[in-house]
Image (cartoon, rainbow, N blue to C red):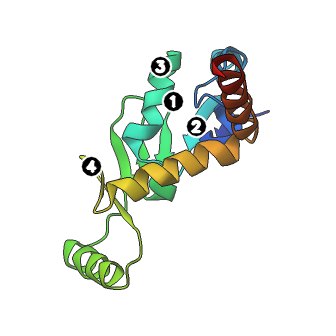
């Protein structure tokens, strides 16, 4: 008997529009109705993970920030493995000195010192999860060019 289903988000639960499809939503609801615990496990922060769940009207426990935090269906922190603040500051300073991009996830959200790089990474995630996007973009440009020329 299955007691728990754990699913990643990117490339698994989410579709090309970064949303939970109706089919996946119904599968989760059916599993929950049978008493199966459905858990989302992701590298995303809790806020990023729950956005898609809330949009789909789903309520699941979340293992987030690559396992550093586990939250109940109600959003209560069950376990948390934070990095000591002094150690985090020292690591951030060394990464910045070496010109290495990084993000910091906190209980108040994600932070970065390079917002342009953060956007570029999000675009890369969307493009790598959706290889047809570049083809569609080229097709749209071609169509625009042919109608305006």
The 10 Å Cα crowd at callout 3, few under 14, some 14 to 19, many 20 or more, is few
Rendered residue at 49%/40% (across/down): 62
Element assignment for label 4: loop
Q: Reply above or below: 70 against 149.
A: below
Cα separation between marks 3 and 2:
16 Å
The local secondary structure at tag 1 comes to loop
Between the C-alphas of marks 3 and 4, the distance is: 21 Å
**Coordinates of residue 34 in the picture (x, y in percent):** 69, 18
Q: Earlier in the sequence, mark 3 or mark 2?
A: 2
Q: Which residue is mark 3?
A: 55
Q: In the structure shown, which secondary structural element does the residue marked by tag 2 occupy?
A: strand
Residue 48 occupies quadrant: top left
Q: Residues within 10 Å of mark 2 (few under 14, many from 20)?
A: many
Q: CA distance from mark 4 to mark 1?
A: 18 Å
Label 2, label 1: how many angstroms apart (C-alpha)? 6 Å
Residue at (32%, 64%) from the top-left corner? Answer: 82
Task: Please name the residue that numbered disc 2 is placed on.
Answer: 39
In-front residue for pair 139/16: 139
In the image, residue 30 sits, relative to residue 132, either above or below, namely above
Q: Residues within 10 Å of mark 1 (few under 14, many from 20)?
A: some
Q: Which residue is mark 1?
A: 60
Counting residues from the start of the chain, the first of labels 3 and 4 encountered is 3
Q: How far apart, in angstroms, are the residues tagged by discs 3 and 1?
A: 13 Å
Name the residue at 61% across, 32% down: 38
Disc 4 target residue: 107
Q: Nearer the viewer, mark 3 or mark 4?
A: 3
């Amino acid at each position: 008997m299955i007691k728990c289903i754990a699913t990643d988000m990117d490339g698994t639960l989410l579709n090309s529009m970064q949303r939970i499809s109706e089919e996946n939503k119904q599968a989760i609801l059916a599993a929950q109705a049978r008493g199966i615990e459905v858990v989302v496990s992701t590298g995303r922060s809790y806020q990023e993970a729950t956005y898609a769940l809330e949009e789909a009207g789903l309520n699941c426990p979340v293992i987030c920030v690559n396992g550093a935090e586990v939250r109940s269906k109600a959003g209560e922190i069950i376990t948390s493995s934070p990095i000591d603040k002094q150690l985090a500051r020292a690591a951030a300073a060394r990464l910045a000195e070496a010109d290495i991009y990084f993000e910091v996830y906190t209980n108040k959200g994600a932070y970065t010192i390079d917002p342009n790089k953060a956007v570029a990474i999000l675009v890369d995630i969307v493009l790598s999860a959706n290889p047809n996007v570049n083809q569609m973009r080229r097709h749209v440009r071609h169509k625009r060019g042919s109608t305006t020329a």
